[in-house]
Image: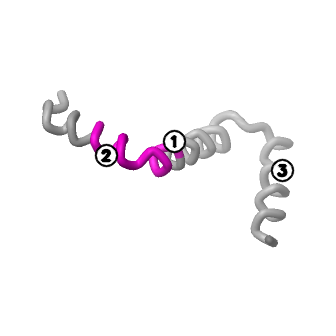
């Protein structure tokens, strides 16, 4: 169980940091996709996209 004070602090942080919250959420989705869902072909495509992005 989370205390009322912690819930209030979490909401305050969420309201103050929407961009960070979105980045953390997307990063979590990406890791789950790579770890649990993506096929070998999907992973190869992602690797190619990452390599292209790193060259920029």
Q: Position of residue 30 (x, y in %)?
A: 63, 44
Q: Secondary structure at mark 2?
A: helix
Q: Which residue is mark 1?
A: 25
Tag nearer the camera, 1 or 2: 2
Q: Which residue is mark 2?
A: 13
Instruction: Give the CA separation, mark 3 to mark 1.
Output: 23 Å
Looking at the image, tell me whether mark 3 or mark 1 is earlier in sequence order.
1
Q: Quadrant of residue 33?
A: top right
View extreme (front): residue: 16
Q: Secondary structure at mark 3?
A: helix
At x 86%, y 42%, the residue is 41
Give the colouring mode of the picture. one colour
At x 78%, y 37%, the residue is 39
Q: Which residue is mark 3?
A: 44
- What range is drawn magenta here? 11-22
Q: Nearer the viewer, residue 32 or 18?
A: 18
Is residue 39 toward the left or the right of residue 2 in the image? right
Q: Secondary structure at mark 1?
A: helix
């Amino acid at each position: 169980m989370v205390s009322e004070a912690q819930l209030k602090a979490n909401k305050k942080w969420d309201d103050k940091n929407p961009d960070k919250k979105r980045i953390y959420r997307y990063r979590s989705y990406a890791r789950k996709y790579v770890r649990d869902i993506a096929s070998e072909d999907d992973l190869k495509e992602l690797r190619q996209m990452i390599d292209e992005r790193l060259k920029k």
